[in-house]
Image (cartoon, helix red, strand yellow):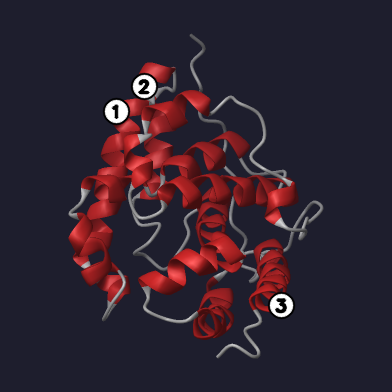
């Protein structure tokens, strides 16, 4: 079995938003599903963890967005980004499901303890599933360094970290993401779409992600008639 080693990660420029170094694809994400089957062994290892909090929708969609962002940033470690985004939210599958909505999506949800807990559990899962699949210790720790804090800290430590963070948010702008997440936050699609524009787009780190999010949100608003149904 080939060991998947960690190569030099991309440095994160201080410029915001981070400009793309390659082409940006802002067409509907359904046109470019995740590429290839090399991550299929990982998916098979975490099927149980994908059945919580819509992860079986969120994770594959986030991978598709992550691959687009890697194409826009060819200097990034594509494998590191792809593996990390596939696993980043699997920890939700090992926390109290009742607490996910009661604590993770209400009140001061960004600081909810359950969000820290799902990051810790996600790292444990990565350390369980990746070594038997041939990923070496350095690579696994690089994955965990991004998973740990992807939801709870403000800053990104590397370009790969930034791309995972942006991909994690981009799925919300597609109509499927709006359909799921608006219910979690107890908002109707129009109000949730407004929140995406006002709060989430400013959080995006890369110019590519902002371009994609803006295009997806425009299509979703038109499809869901949010200008009228509000």
Residue appearing at x 70%, y 66% in the figure:
207
Alpha carbon of mark 3 to alpha carbon of mark 2: how far?
A: 45 Å
Placement of 97 over or under 4, stated as above or below = below
Residue appearing at x 53%, y 73% in the figure:
203
Closer to the eye: label 3 or 2: 3
* Residue to which mark 1 is pinned: 128
Residue appearing at x 44%, y 23% in the figure:
135
Q: Secondary structure at mark 2?
A: helix
Q: Residues within 10 Å of mark 3 (few under 14, many from 20)?
A: few
Which is more toward the observer, 52 or 230? 230
Q: Are marks 1 and 2 in contact (CB under 8 Å)?
A: yes
* Residue to which mark 3 is pinned: 222
Q: Are marks 1 and 3 in contact (CB under 8 Å)?
A: no
Q: Residue furthest front?
A: 229
Residue 34, x across and y down, in percent: 64, 39
Placement of 9 over or under 6, stated as above or below = below
Q: Residues within 10 Å of mark 1 (few under 14, many from 20)?
A: few
Count the labels in the image: 3
Name the side, left or right, on which 195 lies relative to 54. right
Alpha carbon of mark 1 to alpha carbon of mark 3: how far?
A: 43 Å
**Which dot marks residue 113?**
none
Q: Secondary structure at mark 1?
A: helix
Name the side, left or right, on which 86 lies relative to 13. left
* Residue to which mark 2 is pinned: 131
Residue 183, x across and y down, in percent: 40, 72
């Amino acid at each position: 079995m080939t060991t998947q080693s960690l190569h030099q990660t991309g440095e994160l420029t201080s410029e915001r938003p981070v400009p793309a170094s390659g082409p940006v694809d802002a067409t509907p994400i359904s046109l470019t599903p995740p590429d290839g089957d090399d991550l299929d062994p990982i998916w098979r290892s975490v099927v149980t963890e994908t059945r919580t909090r819509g992860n079986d929708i969120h994770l594959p969609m986030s991978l598709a967005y992550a691959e687009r962002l890697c194409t826009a940033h060819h200097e990034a470690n594509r494998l590191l980004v792809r593996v990390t985004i596939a696993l980043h939210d699997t920890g939700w599958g090992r926390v109290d499901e009742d607490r996910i909505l009661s604590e993770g999506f209400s009140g001061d949800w960004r600081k909810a303890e359950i969000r820290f807990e799902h990051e810790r559990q996600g790292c444990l899962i990565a350390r369980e599933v990746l070594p038997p699949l041939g990923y070496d210790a350095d690579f696994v720790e690089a994955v965990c360094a991004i998973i740990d804090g992807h939801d709870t800290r403000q800053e990104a430590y590397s370009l790969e970290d930034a791309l995972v963070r942006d991909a994690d948010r981009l799925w919300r702008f597609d109509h499927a993401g709006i359909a799921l997440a608006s219910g979690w936050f107890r908002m109707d699609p129009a109000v949730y779409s407004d929140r995406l524009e006002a709060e989430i787009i400013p959080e995006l780190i890369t110019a590519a992600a902002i371009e994609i999010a803006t295009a997806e949100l425009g299509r979703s608003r038109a499809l869901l008639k949010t200008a009228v149904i509000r």
